[in-house]
Image (cartoon, rainbow, N blue to C red):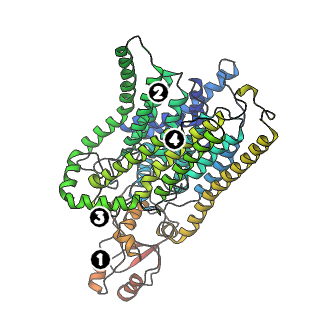
């Protein structure tokens, strides 16, 4: 059934992609554009309380679109330009397939998977609706559901587990990554296309804090922003399509995470710049009016889904973690005071100027590379270029994001988390990755402009200035291709290593003793965890809530040596999960219950525990 579901879902994605081509979307943007259209449609159904129906309706529509496209194509009414398979296509297909296979066998480990990202997918998959006030298993109710909707759609047909969720998110990322090749002037030049492949593989170096085997959306924000900017650039002569593209990508980004507002501002600024470049009028006033109307109208349409979401959050929930609220910000400032602000600021500056920081290293490396490329192209190739201007823009983006991030720590994060700059490298990786992609795109186009033959129709194997430049080009192409493959395999092997390293972690061990529950319940469950830090940080509790689909799960690492306290504590729960051997718990069970308990999943009775087989589904 999973295979049939995968085929059905894949046909739907192809159908949407074909429909995008029909309305003249770039072939390299059709995949991600089609996926975002599905997300928006799913969002509408979800907000109307029809998510289950919506998943089937949206997916079926994709299949219908594909059948229609094939039928019309057969009768000669629709035709699409086909460029053929390029070197980067083979790179994307082969390495994407290998990465997907690795992710399919990967467990979820990161804390935030269980505190929200995986839990919301599971919730929508098995309940068929968005969280309500009574659904307390979802803590971060203000987080928009864009990626979760797409993942829920995928697992609805393929089956719900960690691997399928990861593959779904990777499909979204890989589809957006493909958009980068739309910027190539000449897609037959192996050097240029492989440089962009290398940029994709290098981007995962700066995503190493979470990797691809997590459902966190920090990398998704960067790759979707890149795809949005690419579309604005290539649709310069298609104003209506450009407007629809900006509205779609801005609207979806805002539904990925609240912090996406920063990246939507970048998109809006670039779109405004392109409008100023394109729109002309008889008078200054008319030109300004036309630009303002197009810009503000497009952004308003893009903001409508998020406005709808904010209204939904305000009217549905009384309070929500990390929500956008002036009252919450005011309370945070009054609670921490100036002393707290100064302390957080000092830690922030230390982190920025720490050369061991991966984000700082990325900032410095990008500056060095672009300055070096500018000098070589200008003085060695005698070709003036705007790489220094670009670098100024990218550095400005980084600086503004630093201030944005500092504001988040001060205004919306608890002091004990803010003072340690919790998640700093993860948050900053988004901007580093985005700047890397922008820098790579512009650099590749500048390199293309330095080639001997500028007439793209005349280019061929013999169009080189000399045999030396031809040999140098071929060697450079081979080296870049080699490193792009090696770097991507490094990410693949790194994910495999992480999976192997984590084989004794709590999320993996719990699968050895119990089946996951799929029916939302309020059962009281105790998860015994010998690692105190996993209990005090609520990691064990969030994991148990996700795994057993309840909001009454608790992690515990310390047990009383006294019989009355031990029994009283245990009798609070209906079930006990012991994924790892805990000496104190085993000793207490032996002494007070006269049972030998090492690991397993147990039903709690008055004077004993009953082992439940790991192959048995309780709910």
Q: Residue furthest top?
A: 282
Alpha-carbon distance for marks 1 and 3? 29 Å
Alpha-carbon distance for marks 4 and 3? 40 Å
Instruction: Report crowding for label 1: few under 14, some 14 to 19, many 20 or more residues within 10 A (C-alpha).
Output: few
566 left or right, relative to 507: left
User: Number of labelled discs?
Assistant: 4
Q: Can you give x and y, in whole percent of width and height, for residue 283 in the image?
A: 38, 12
Q: Nearer the viewer, mark 2 or mark 1?
A: 2
Q: Which mark is residue 274?
A: 2
Whether the residues at callouts 2 and 3 have beta carbons within 8 Å, the answer is no
Decide if residue 163 is in sight here: yes
Instruction: Report crowding for label 4: few under 14, some 14 to 19, many 20 or more residues within 10 A (C-alpha).
Output: some
- Mark 3 = which residue? 416
4 or 3: tag closer to the N-terminus: 4
Q: Secondary structure at mark 4?
A: helix
**In-front residue for pair 404/61:** 404
Q: Can you give x and y, in whole percent of width and height, for residue 518 in the image?
A: 44, 56
- Mark 4 = which residue? 388
Q: Can you give x and y, in whole percent of width and height, for residue 142 in the image?
A: 32, 47
569 left or right, relative to 594: left
Q: Nearer the viewer, mark 1 or mark 3?
A: 3
Q: Nearer the viewer, mark 4 or mark 3?
A: 4
- Mark 1 = which residue? 569
User: Which residue is at a point 55% across and 41% down the rendered structure image?
Assistant: 176
Q: Nearer the viewer, mark 1 or mark 4?
A: 4
395 left or right, relative to 421: right
**In-front residue for pair 437/101:** 437
């Amino acid at each position: 059934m999973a295979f049939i579901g995968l085929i059905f879902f894949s046909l739907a994605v192809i159908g949407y992609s074909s429909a995008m081509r029909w309305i003249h979307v770039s072939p390299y943007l059709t995949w991600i554009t089609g996926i975002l259209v599905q997300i928006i449609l799913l969002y509408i159904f979800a907000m109307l309380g029809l998510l289950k129906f919506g998943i089937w309706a949206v997916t079926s529509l994709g299949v219908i679109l594909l059948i229609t496209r094939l039928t019309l194509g057969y009768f000669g009414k629709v035709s699409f330009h086909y460029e053929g398979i390029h070197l980067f296509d083979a790179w994307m297909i082969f390495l994407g397939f290998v990465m997907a296979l690795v992710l399919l066998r990967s467990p979820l480990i990161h804390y935030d998977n269980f505190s929200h990202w995986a839990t919301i997918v599971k919730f929508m998959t098995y309940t068929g609706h968005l969280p309500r006030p009574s659904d307390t298993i979802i803590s971060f109710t203000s987080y928009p559901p864009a990626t979760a909707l797409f993942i829920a759609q995928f697992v609805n047909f393929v089956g719900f587990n960690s691997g399928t969720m990861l593959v779904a998110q990777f499909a979204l990322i890989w589809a957006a990554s493909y958009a980068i090749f739309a910027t190539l002037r000449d897609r037959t030049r192996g050097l240029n296309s492989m440089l962009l492949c290398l940029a994709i593989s290098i981007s995962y170096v700066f995503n190493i804090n979470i990797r691809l085997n997590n459902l966190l959306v920090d990398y998704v924000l960067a790759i979707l922003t890149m795809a949005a900017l690419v579309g604005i650039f290539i649709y310069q002569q298609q104003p209506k399509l450009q407007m629809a593209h900006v509205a779609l990508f801005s609207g979806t980004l805002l539904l990925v995470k609240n912090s996406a507002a920063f990246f939507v501002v970048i998109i809006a600024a670039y779109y405004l710049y392109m409008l100023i470049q394109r729109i002309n009028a008889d008078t200054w006033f008319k030109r300004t009016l036309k630009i303002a109307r197009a810009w503000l109208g497009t952004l308003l349409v893009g903001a409508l889904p998020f406005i709808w979401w904010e209204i939904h959050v305000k009217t549905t929930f009384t309070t929500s973690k990390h929500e956008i609220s002036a009252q919450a910000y005011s309370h945070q400032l009054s609670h921490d005071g100036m002393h707290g602000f100064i302390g957080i600021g000092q830690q922030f500056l230390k982190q920025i100027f720490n050369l061991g920081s991966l984000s700082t290293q990325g900032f410095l490396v990008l500056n060095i590379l672009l300055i070096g490329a500018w000098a070589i192209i200008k003085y060695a190739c005698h070709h003036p270029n705007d790489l220094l201007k670009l670098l100024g823009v990218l550095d400005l983006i980084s600086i503004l994001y630093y201030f944005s991030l500092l504001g988040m720590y001060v205004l919306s994060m608890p002091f004990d988390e803010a003072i340690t700059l919790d998640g700093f490298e993860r948050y900053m990786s988004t901007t580093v990755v985005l700047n890397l992609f922008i820098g790579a795109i512009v650099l590749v186009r500048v390199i293309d402009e330095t080639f001997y033959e500028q007439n793209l129709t005349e280019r061929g194997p013999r169009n080189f200035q000399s045999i030396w430049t031809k040999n140098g080009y071929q060697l450079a192409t081979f080296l870049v291709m080699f490193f792009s493959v090696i770097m991507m395999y490094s990410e693949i092997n790194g994910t495999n290593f992480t999976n192997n390293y984590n084989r004794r972690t709590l999320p993996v061990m719990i699968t050895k003793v119990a089946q996951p529950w799929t029916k939302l319940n309020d059962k009281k469950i105790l998860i015994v965890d010998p690692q105190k830090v996993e209990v005090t940080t609520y990691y064990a509790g969030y994991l148990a809530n996700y795994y057993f689909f309840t909001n009454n799960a608790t992690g515990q690492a310390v047990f009383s040596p006294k019989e009355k306290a031990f029994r009283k504590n245990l009798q609070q729960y209906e079930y006990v999960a012991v994924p790892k051997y805990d000496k104190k718990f085993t000793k207490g069970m032996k002494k007070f219950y006269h049972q030998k308990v090492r690991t397993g999943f147990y039903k709690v009775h008055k004077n004993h525990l009953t082992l439940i087989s790991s192959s048995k589904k309780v709910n």
